[in-house]
Image (spheres, grey):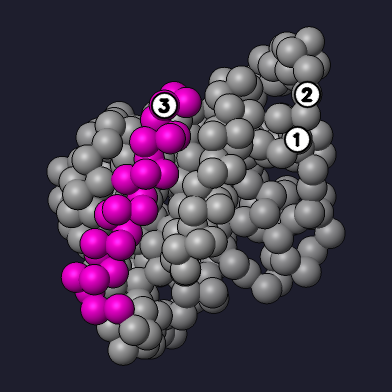
Amino acid sequence: MKLDLSCGRIGVKADQRQAIDYAHKYGFEAVVPDAGYLGKLTNSQLDELNSELKSKKLVFSAAGMPVDFRNDEAKFQQGLQALPSYATSLQRAGVTRTGTWLMPTHAELTYNANFKRHAKRLKAVTQILADHGLRFGLEYVGPKTLWSSKKYPFIHSLPETQELIAAIDVKGAGLILDSWHWYTAHETKDDILALTNDQIVAVDLNDAPKGLEIDEQIDQKRELPMATGVIDLATFLNSLNEIRYDGPVRAEPFNAALRAMPGDQAVATTAKAMKKAFALIS
């Protein structure tokens, strides 16, 4: 597993160069790639950047996936047409992982109708990414407070996400596994041990606030790893280690106190929390 810095996920505004500097300064092993920045580099500039990453013992982790597949067809098609250029920028830089999240509810579409739309649209997305050597991870969102918030619940567990991946049926489609969603979906060690390294594209690491039942947890109110001990991160991380997961692990706490910190302090605080969590791995 690689300690991954995602500045956006901890509320730090940083361009690609600043993110690399932060990652190196605070002992991370991977950093999120910025396709927009990378796409503007010449071949020689890209070679220089890759040499710098190597000298700083860093690699690129998983990029986002920019296509809006959740709304109207016209917007989806517009995004799909722009995706090859985005994917090319990542491929040139040696990036091999991308991902996105799944909204676990819908006001109008039933589960089956929403599933069919997701399978069709994400199949097209996955194929383009796969053609550029990019794996595509899907992240389910587990809290009951969110999936029950509209008329029709949608995918909010690991088994349901695996069903969608099977329906997409394109090599390279996989999972983004988040300790927060694993916890709020009432999942266990056995759910992780049933997976293989090849099925997981990226991992998010979070803790949860104290004083709430699992089904009372609210998605945008999380904690840094090891902050409370509510989520059993020892079991989570050691299960991933047991299946020999070797990809990026990043913090995504959506935490107001962390977001209010200056950039350096927020990254340093995140690094400390992540290293404390990694020390649980035996």
Camera-near label (1 vs 3) is 3
Q: Is residue 120 magenta?
A: yes
Circle 3 crowding by C-alpha within 10 Å: few under 14, some 14–19, many from 20: some
Q: Nearer the viewer, residue 12 or 222?
A: 12
The answer to which image quadrant residue 195 occupies is top left
Residue at 71% in and 60% down: 11
Name the amino acid type tagged 2: Leu
Please name the residue shown 84% across and 59% down the image.
262
Q: Is residue 86 visible?
A: yes
Foreground: disc 2 or disc 3: 3
Judged from this view, the residue extending furthest toward the front is: 74
Q: CA distance from mark 2 to mark 3?
A: 21 Å
Which residue, given by chain and number where applicable, does mark 3 sit on?
Answer: 131
Residue 11 against residue 99 in the figure, above or below: below
SS for callout 1: helix
Q: Residues within 10 Å of mark 1 (few under 14, many from 20)?
A: few
Please state which amino acid type lies under the numbered disc 3.
Asp
The image's mark for residue 256 is none
On screen, residue 61 versus residue 217, left or right, reads right
Q: Which mark is residue 41?
A: 2
| Residue under numbered circle 1 | 37
Q: Please report whichever mark, 1 or 3, sits nearer to the chain's N-terminal start.
A: 1
Looking at the rendered image, the quarter that the N terminus falls into is top left
Give the residue at x 58% y 27%: 88
